[in-house]
Amino acid sequence: MAFLLAADSLKGVTRTCFIADGSRCENSAEHSWHVALMAMVLAEHATEPIDIQRVIELLVTHDLVEVYAGDTLIYDEDAVKGQAERESVAAQRLFSTLPLDQQASLTCMWREFEERSTPEARFARAIDALAPTWLHWGEHATPAANGLRAQTVLRRKRELLEPYPMLFKLLKDVVDSAVDRGLLAP
Protein backbone atom coordinates (compact mmCIF):
# COMPACT_ATOMS: atom_id res chain seq x y z
CA MET A 1 0.00 0.00 0.00
CA ALA A 2 2.95 2.34 0.60
CA PHE A 3 3.94 1.90 -3.05
CA LEU A 4 0.41 2.63 -4.27
CA LEU A 5 0.20 5.72 -2.10
CA ALA A 6 3.54 6.96 -3.46
CA ALA A 7 2.42 6.20 -7.03
CA ASP A 8 -0.66 8.36 -6.45
CA SER A 9 1.74 11.30 -6.26
CA LEU A 10 2.19 10.96 -10.03
CA LYS A 11 -1.07 12.91 -10.30
CA GLY A 12 0.77 15.93 -8.90
CA VAL A 13 3.78 15.83 -11.24
CA THR A 14 3.18 18.57 -13.80
CA ARG A 15 4.63 18.09 -17.26
CA THR A 16 5.53 20.77 -19.80
CA CYS A 17 3.04 19.53 -22.39
CA PHE A 18 -0.44 21.00 -22.57
CA ILE A 19 -3.58 18.91 -22.65
CA ALA A 20 -5.36 18.97 -26.01
CA ASP A 21 -7.53 22.01 -25.28
CA GLY A 22 -4.47 24.04 -24.23
CA SER A 23 -6.01 25.08 -20.92
CA ARG A 24 -3.27 23.65 -18.72
CA CYS A 25 -0.30 21.32 -18.66
CA GLU A 26 -0.97 17.65 -18.18
CA ASN A 27 0.27 15.69 -15.19
CA SER A 28 2.30 12.51 -15.43
CA ALA A 29 -0.60 10.25 -14.43
CA GLU A 30 -2.73 11.68 -17.24
CA HIS A 31 0.18 11.18 -19.63
CA SER A 32 0.58 7.53 -18.58
CA TRP A 33 -3.13 6.85 -19.10
CA HIS A 34 -3.19 8.59 -22.46
CA VAL A 35 -0.12 6.87 -23.91
CA ALA A 36 -1.54 3.49 -22.83
CA LEU A 37 -4.75 4.30 -24.69
CA MET A 38 -2.81 5.58 -27.71
CA ALA A 39 -0.84 2.32 -27.83
CA MET A 40 -4.04 0.30 -27.88
CA VAL A 41 -5.49 2.41 -30.69
CA LEU A 42 -2.29 2.64 -32.74
CA ALA A 43 -1.05 -0.94 -32.20
CA GLU A 44 -1.83 -1.83 -35.81
CA HIS A 45 1.07 0.42 -36.82
CA ALA A 46 3.67 -1.64 -34.98
CA THR A 47 6.15 -2.98 -37.50
CA GLU A 48 7.06 -6.09 -35.53
CA PRO A 49 4.78 -8.43 -33.57
CA ILE A 50 3.95 -7.05 -30.13
CA ASP A 51 2.04 -8.11 -27.06
CA ILE A 52 -0.16 -5.05 -26.48
CA GLN A 53 -0.73 -6.01 -22.85
CA ARG A 54 3.01 -5.81 -22.26
CA VAL A 55 3.19 -2.47 -24.07
CA ILE A 56 0.50 -1.11 -21.75
CA GLU A 57 2.33 -2.45 -18.68
CA LEU A 58 5.52 -0.71 -19.82
CA LEU A 59 3.73 2.56 -20.48
CA VAL A 60 1.97 2.54 -17.12
CA THR A 61 5.25 1.73 -15.34
CA HIS A 62 7.82 3.90 -17.12
CA ASP A 63 6.92 7.29 -15.65
CA LEU A 64 6.40 6.10 -12.07
CA VAL A 65 9.93 7.27 -11.29
CA GLU A 66 8.74 10.84 -11.87
CA VAL A 67 7.17 10.63 -8.40
CA TYR A 68 10.69 11.33 -7.08
CA ALA A 69 12.65 12.42 -10.16
CA GLY A 70 10.11 14.79 -11.71
CA ASP A 71 9.50 15.15 -15.43
CA THR A 72 12.46 15.99 -17.66
CA LEU A 73 11.91 18.19 -20.69
CA ILE A 74 13.74 16.40 -23.49
CA TYR A 75 14.76 19.69 -25.08
CA ASP A 76 16.59 20.84 -21.92
CA GLU A 77 20.08 19.51 -22.60
CA ASP A 78 21.34 20.14 -19.05
CA ALA A 79 18.38 18.32 -17.47
CA VAL A 80 18.72 15.40 -19.88
CA LYS A 81 22.37 14.91 -18.87
CA GLY A 82 21.40 13.91 -15.32
CA GLN A 83 18.10 12.24 -16.13
CA ALA A 84 19.26 8.62 -16.15
CA GLU A 85 20.92 8.93 -12.75
CA ARG A 86 17.96 10.80 -11.18
CA GLU A 87 15.50 8.26 -12.52
CA SER A 88 17.60 5.28 -11.46
CA VAL A 89 17.76 6.58 -7.89
CA ALA A 90 14.02 7.29 -7.99
CA ALA A 91 13.25 3.78 -9.29
CA GLN A 92 15.25 2.19 -6.49
CA ARG A 93 13.52 4.35 -3.88
CA LEU A 94 10.01 3.76 -5.21
CA PHE A 95 10.22 0.08 -6.13
CA SER A 96 11.98 -0.83 -2.87
CA THR A 97 8.65 -0.31 -1.08
CA LEU A 98 7.28 -3.41 -2.82
CA PRO A 99 7.70 -7.08 -1.93
CA LEU A 100 10.85 -8.50 -3.58
CA ASP A 101 9.06 -10.27 -6.44
CA GLN A 102 7.06 -7.17 -7.39
CA GLN A 103 10.11 -4.97 -6.90
CA ALA A 104 12.03 -7.14 -9.37
CA SER A 105 9.13 -7.21 -11.83
CA LEU A 106 8.58 -3.43 -11.93
CA THR A 107 12.30 -2.71 -12.01
CA CYS A 108 12.65 -5.07 -14.99
CA MET A 109 9.73 -3.39 -16.77
CA TRP A 110 11.17 0.06 -16.15
CA ARG A 111 14.60 -1.04 -17.48
CA GLU A 112 13.05 -2.82 -20.47
CA PHE A 113 11.32 0.41 -21.46
CA GLU A 114 14.41 2.56 -20.94
CA GLU A 115 16.70 0.16 -22.82
CA ARG A 116 14.19 -0.54 -25.64
CA SER A 117 15.25 -4.17 -25.33
CA THR A 118 12.06 -5.75 -26.73
CA PRO A 119 9.62 -5.04 -29.57
CA GLU A 120 7.09 -3.97 -26.93
CA ALA A 121 9.52 -1.51 -25.36
CA ARG A 122 10.46 -0.03 -28.72
CA PHE A 123 6.79 0.49 -29.62
CA ALA A 124 6.02 1.91 -26.17
CA ARG A 125 8.90 4.38 -26.49
CA ALA A 126 7.65 5.45 -29.93
CA ILE A 127 4.16 6.12 -28.57
CA ASP A 128 5.65 7.95 -25.59
CA ALA A 129 7.64 10.16 -27.99
CA LEU A 130 4.71 10.86 -30.30
CA ALA A 131 2.07 11.71 -27.69
CA PRO A 132 3.39 14.99 -26.28
CA THR A 133 4.33 16.34 -29.71
CA TRP A 134 0.89 15.60 -31.07
CA LEU A 135 -0.91 16.98 -28.01
CA HIS A 136 1.20 20.11 -27.92
CA TRP A 137 1.30 20.97 -31.63
CA GLY A 138 -1.37 18.89 -33.42
CA GLU A 139 -4.03 20.60 -35.57
CA HIS A 140 -6.15 21.14 -32.45
CA ALA A 141 -3.38 22.97 -30.54
CA THR A 142 -2.17 26.56 -30.43
CA PRO A 143 0.68 26.97 -27.91
CA ALA A 144 3.88 28.34 -29.37
CA ALA A 145 7.17 26.63 -28.58
CA ASN A 146 9.23 29.66 -27.55
CA GLY A 147 12.10 29.30 -29.98
CA LEU A 148 12.13 25.52 -30.32
CA ARG A 149 13.01 24.49 -33.85
CA ALA A 150 11.27 21.81 -35.90
CA GLN A 151 14.60 20.20 -36.73
CA THR A 152 15.31 19.83 -32.98
CA VAL A 153 11.98 18.07 -32.42
CA LEU A 154 12.57 15.72 -35.33
CA ARG A 155 16.18 15.02 -34.31
CA ARG A 156 15.14 14.10 -30.75
CA LYS A 157 12.31 11.81 -31.88
CA ARG A 158 13.50 10.37 -35.20
CA GLU A 159 15.30 7.34 -33.74
CA LEU A 160 12.23 6.30 -31.74
CA LEU A 161 9.59 6.87 -34.42
CA GLU A 162 11.30 6.25 -37.76
CA PRO A 163 10.97 2.44 -37.45
CA TYR A 164 7.17 2.97 -37.55
CA PRO A 165 6.49 4.67 -40.91
CA MET A 166 2.90 5.68 -40.20
CA LEU A 167 3.77 7.09 -36.76
CA PHE A 168 6.82 8.90 -38.14
CA LYS A 169 4.69 10.39 -40.92
CA LEU A 170 2.21 11.58 -38.29
CA LEU A 171 5.06 13.18 -36.33
CA LYS A 172 6.39 14.94 -39.43
CA ASP A 173 2.89 16.13 -40.38
CA VAL A 174 2.36 17.53 -36.86
CA VAL A 175 5.74 19.29 -36.93
CA ASP A 176 5.20 20.67 -40.45
CA SER A 177 1.75 21.95 -39.49
CA ALA A 178 3.14 23.54 -36.33
CA VAL A 179 5.77 25.34 -38.43
CA ASP A 180 3.10 26.50 -40.90
CA ARG A 181 1.02 27.88 -38.02
CA GLY A 182 4.00 29.65 -36.46
CA LEU A 183 4.13 27.43 -33.36
CA LEU A 184 7.58 25.99 -34.13
CA ALA A 185 10.51 27.66 -35.82
CA PRO A 186 11.57 25.90 -39.04
Image (tube, rainbow, N blue to C red):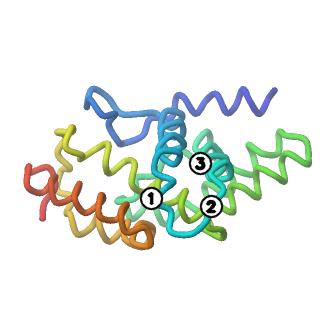
Decide if residue 104 is on the left or right side of residue 68: right
What residue is drawn where x is 8% and y is 51%?
Answer: 182
Q: Residue furthest front?
A: 44
Cβ–Cβ under 8 Å for marks 1 and 2: no
Q: Which mark is drawn over residue 79?
A: 1
Disc 1 residue type (three-letter): Ala
Disc 2 residue type (three-letter): Ile
Residue 153 rendering spot, x and y as whole percentages: 29, 63
Q: Which mark is drawn over residue 50?
A: 2
Distance, label 2 to label 3, CA atoms, is: 14 Å
Distance, label 1 to label 2, CA atoms, is: 32 Å
Q: Which residue is label 3 attached to?
A: 59
What residue is drawn where x is 32% and y is 71%?
Answer: 155
Callout 1: 10 Å neighbours few (<14), some, many (20+)? some
Q: Earlier in the sequence, mark 2 or mark 3?
A: 2
In front: label 1 or label 3: 3
Decide if residue 120 is on the left or right side of residue 103: left
Secondary structure of the residue carrying numbered label 1: helix
Q: Earlier in the sequence, mark 1 or mark 3?
A: 3
Residue 121 rendering spot, x and y as whole percentages: 61, 62
What residue is drawn where x is 8% and y is 55%?
Answer: 180
Disc 3 residue type (three-letter): Leu
Secondary structure of the residue carrying numbered label 3: helix
Residue 127 rendering spot, x and y as whole percentages: 47, 54
